Image (cartoon, helix red, strand yellow):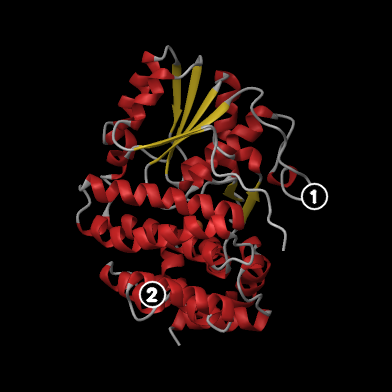
């Protein structure tokens, strides 16, 4: 199979303490900062970012209304402010939601003639960007990889259906990985976002599009995340642990944005949209069941065995279950959703959505709809 073109990031990627200092060297007039909530304001980092940008001679404006699953209405609200403010830099500062919303606002700011998500999903395409502004991302959690990804997920404001859009045009130009900014993440959030990063690396590793370069990135990410996630979970203010998590969630992002993911993400996207289960948590719960399922494929099985060997554990499945247990992640979706009737009533719809999800196309086994339904039951009931 011929390899697809890869892109590992934008122009500049910096990691480590004081990476934010890069901001004062930037050239530009106005920066629009997209945030999800006031956490970055409260921990003092917003003031720091603003003052560094001012040192660079830039005027700033911030928008902090992005919700955990950003909606199209929010994207349009931010776009409207951008059209008045006319920034030449857009900053996505936050987890995946803030960065995804910033990227989406960027598209509609550059092209105000576009009016809906349908205008940028197939058969339409994401138009050329960077005529008005460039994009800089500062992730504040270690999980999504959105800072080096070509993708966004935006929900319809009414139906809550999630639109995934991917195009290399959306790759952020500059990424600053400042470990201190992630230090105030609460335990549960560290666990869920960290398991999202681990799922990215594992699904990229067994993706039907995996190649040698993505394997190098994914394999190293899996090793380091398995080591540092429980440490960062237990000792959140240790900057060495935070830095490793921030770095390897970014590296796993580089892997998956190029070779895509698998059915864990297919299943969790649908269940997240329907029941509001946080993305990382849904992935963490789903991952063990899918490793078991994918073991039926010889290539995936060999890759899982290789990982277990490198990690020095009897099985990858056991290692994932152990991580979930250490971090108090439930074993089933039932413990989170707690509504069997509604789950049963939604099962057909969820299965169709997961089967048709873009990520499912690169799962080691392309499942029949009945298999997806059976997997949903396992992930929900644990049997
Ligand atoms: Fe994810």
The residue carrying mark 1 is 123
Mark 2 element type: helix
Residue behind label 2 places its C-beta within 8 angstroms of ligand 1 = no
Which residue is nearer to you in this view: 304 or 126? 304
Residue 152 in view here: yes
Which residue is nearer to you in this view: 128 or 348? 128
The percent coordinates of residue 247 (x first, y second) are: 38, 47
Name the residue: 50% across, 46% down. Answer: 146
Instruction: Name the image quarter holding residue 87.
Output: top right
Q: Residue 156 bears which disc, if any?
A: none
Quarter of the figure with the C terminus: bottom left
Local crowd size for mark 2, using a 10 Å CA cut-off: few (<14), some (14–19), many (≥20): few
Name the residue: 31% across, 25% down. Answer: 48
Name the residue: 61% across, 39% down. Answer: 170
Which residue is nearer to you in this view: 314 or 257? 314
Answer with left or right where residue 69 lies relative to residue 112. Answer: left
Name the residue: 39% across, 62% down. Answer: 195
The percent coordinates of residue 351 (x first, y second) are: 62, 74
User: Furthest-right residue in view?
Assistant: 123
Answer with left or right where residue 194 lies relative to residue 345. Answer: left
* Circles 2 and 1: CB atoms closer than 8 Å: no
Q: CA distance from mark 2 to mark 1?
A: 44 Å
The percent coordinates of residue 30 (x first, y second) are: 50, 17
Mark 2 or 1, closer to the camera: 2
Quarter of the figure with the N terminus: bottom right
The residue carrying mark 2 is 309
Residue 278 in view here: no
- Going from N to C along the chain, the mark reached first, 2 or 1, is 1
The percent coordinates of residue 325 (x first, y second) are: 29, 73
């Amino acid at each position: 199979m011929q390899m697809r073109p890869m892109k590992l990031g934008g122009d500049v990627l910096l990691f480590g303490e004081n990476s934010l200092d890069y901001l004062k060297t930037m050239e530009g007039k106005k920066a629009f900062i997209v945030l999800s909530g006031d956490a970055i304001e409260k921990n003092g980092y917003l003031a720091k970012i603003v003052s560094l940008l001012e040192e660079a001679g830039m005027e700033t404006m911030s928008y902090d209304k992005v919700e955990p699953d950003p909606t199209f209405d929010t994207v349009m609200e931010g776009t409207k402010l951008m059209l008045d403010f006319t920034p030449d830099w857009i900053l996505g500062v936050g987890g995946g939601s803030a960065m995804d919303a910033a990227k989406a606002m960027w598209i509609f700011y550059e092209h105000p003639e576009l009016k809906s998500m349908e205008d940028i999903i197939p058969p339409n395409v994401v138009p050329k960007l960077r005529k008005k502004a460039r994009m800089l991302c500062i992730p504040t959690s270690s999980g999504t990889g959105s800072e080096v990804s070509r993708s966004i997920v935006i929900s319809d404001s009414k139906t809550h259906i999630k639109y995934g859009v991917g195009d290399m045009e959306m790759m952020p130009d500059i990424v600053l990985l400042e470990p201190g900014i992630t230090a105030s993440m609460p335990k549960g959030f560290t666990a869920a976002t960290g398991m999202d990063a681990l799922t990215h690396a594992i699904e990229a590793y067994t993706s039907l599009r995996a190649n040698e370069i993505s394997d190098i990135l994914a394999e190293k990410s899996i090793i380091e995340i398995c080591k540092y996630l429980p440490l960062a979970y237990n000792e959140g203010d240790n900057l060495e642990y935070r830095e490793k998590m921030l770095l390897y969630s970014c590296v796993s992002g580089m892997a998956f944005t190029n070779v895509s993911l698998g059915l864990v993400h297919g299943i969790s996207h649908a269940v997240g949209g329907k029941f509001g289960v946080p993305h990382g948590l849904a992935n963490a719960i789903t991952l063990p069941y899918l490793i078991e399922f994918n073991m039926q494929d010889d290539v995936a099985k060999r890759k899982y065995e290789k990982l277990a060997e490198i990690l020095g554990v009897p099985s990858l499945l056991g290692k994932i279950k152990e991580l979930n247990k250490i971090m108090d992640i439930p074993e089933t979706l039932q413990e989170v959703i707690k509504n069997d009737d509604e789950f049963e009533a939604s099962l057909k719809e969820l299965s169709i959505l997961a089967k048709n999800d873009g990520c499912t196309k690169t799962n080691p086994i392309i499942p029949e709809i009945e298999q997806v339904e059976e997997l949903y039951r396992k992930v929900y009931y644990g049997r």
